[in-house]
Amino acid sequence: MRRRALAACLVILAATLAACSEGKEQRTLRVLASPELADIKPLLRDLEEDTGVTLDVDFTATADLDAPPGSYDLAWPASDRSYLLRLREERRRVPESTAIMRSPVVVGLTPDAARRITTGKPLTWADIADAAAEGTVRFGMPDPRRSDTGRAALVGVATAAAGTGGALRRKDVSCDRLRGFRSGQTLTGASSRELIDTYVRRQGAADALIAHEAELLALNARGKLKAPLTIVHPADGMVLSDFPLLLLDPARHKPYREVVDWLRRDDVQERLARATWRRPVGADVPRPPALRAPIGNALSYPDQLAVVRRLMDNYGDPGRRRAGDHVVFLLDFSPSMRGARMADLRAAFRGLSGADPSAAGKFARFYRGERITVVRFAGRVLEQRTVTVRGAGDLRRLNDVVAGGGFAPDTAVWSALDHGYRLAADTVRDGDQGPLSIVLMTDGESNTGMSYGEFARRYAGLAAGARDVPTFPVPFGEADGRQLRRAADATGGRVVDAGSSSLSQAFKEIRGCR
């Protein structure tokens, strides 16, 4: 009897322990989180004490939340926008998502950099791009291919560059407007946390950081910088991250809701703001003085994943040095170009050299490291000048060719274009070149030199790399639009109608485009 009673007690005890163990296991949620959310660790013990739910957090999330199915119950990225776009594209279930905190992607400038580019007006992404192209600012930004912070930064800059006021569309990134901006990047990292750690060790490698407002405020507070960064909220808008908590496993909905409700309590939101420098989701929650100013203009995120992918492909690997573009300008200096047409041409070059104060001009200007060849032609090649932009002196020399060149009789359009492709062939053969393109501007029919047919035969005999170089004709006045269109189609370029907008705008649209 005693043995049976003891055995029964042991069975009950084992069942009770198993039930307790099972209950505890069910109250533990596995979370894939952004590395920059490591600053919430001190609050996790209080969350467990108040709710009985334990968060087992893995701070290794990428922008795409790549993980084997079933590996995690929840995800906690800085932003879920790209991830949700991918799920919709793949027609997969979209998980429940709740915003927990907010922080815009902004710019932190060293005091010297802030003094160099501050004009008295609110700074914009266009100002940052202009300074990067000029070589005045070198910046660090997380890798957009791996970091949701870096991706949000790139979307913000590209949206400002598009100048439409709305979410980026595919056509807004068909020509990369960010090459001047890209030329200023000198630091990167797989996450913003890695980027900032690198910057602390190598503060001389950059004089600006692009990251969340919260991260830059926290960095200033750590006291490890030579001088605190000046935090700039670009006036042309920022992408706002809301650090959402996502329910990946619907079976864990009850503990998920308990965690969300706890995190969004006013007292917890206030603690989060003070501990992480992120803004509360509730407007009435008290916050530190640094978080009391309005965020500013929030930009929309693209609603198509193809737009985001195309943007990242255009930007490339920020950890690798990118060879500068090479653009060959073939410019008609026949007598019919005298007057207003030549005045427009010279104004366009001055604008590309930094004289255009518009936002579009700042994003599209010639940039440090870019290679520019100007060929003046009439019935023959009159002058040729190539510069690799290193400073204002190079741009002055380039403008001197355009501004001071004289005119000559006749118009040898196809001989000039053939000359351009001989230059392209030499460049391709030498190697180590960036994207190469030819811009052909003329206002007349070709009345001397080789025919279009002869040009086409010579073009067909070029090596494959040279044949890949596109031509963008810009016809004026009496120029033969049909023949120019044939040349554009044959080489993979397109005709740009300067008459529908302006020559300056036409040059901005086609520089380096593919």
Image (spheres, rainbow, N blue to C red):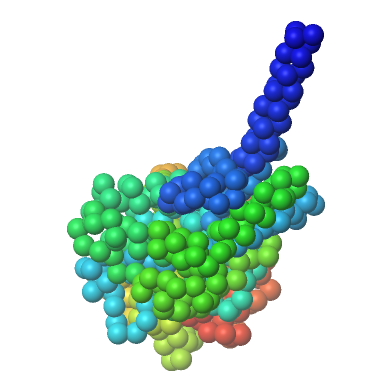
Numbered label tally: 0
Considering only vertical position in the picture, is 500 above or below 449? below
- Looking at the figure, which quarter contains the C terminus? bottom right
Considering only vertical position in the picture, is 103 above or below 399? above
- Could you tell me if residue 196 is visible in this image? yes
- Could you tell me if residue 439 is visible in this image? no
The residue at 65%/30% (across/down) is: 21
Q: Position of residue 211 (x, y in %)?
A: 42, 60
Q: Horizontally, is 277 left or right of 164 in the view?
A: left
Residue nearest the viewer, comparing 511 with 310 = 310
Residue nearest the viewer, comparing 396 with 72 = 72
Q: Position of residue 267 (x, y in %)?
A: 49, 65
- Looking at the figure, which quarter contains the N terminus? top right
The residue at 39%/46% (across/down) is: 194
**The image quarter in which residue 245 lies:** bottom right
Q: Position of residue 280 (x, y in %)?
A: 50, 68
The residue at 45%/73% (across/down) is: 286
Considering only vertical position in the picture, is 474 above or below 303? below
Q: Position of residue 221 (x, y in %)?
A: 29, 60
Residue farthest to the bottom?
A: 339
The residue at 23%/68% (across/down) is: 111
Q: Horizontally, is 82 left or right of 150 in the view?
A: right
Considering only vertical position in the picture, is 436 above or below 439? above
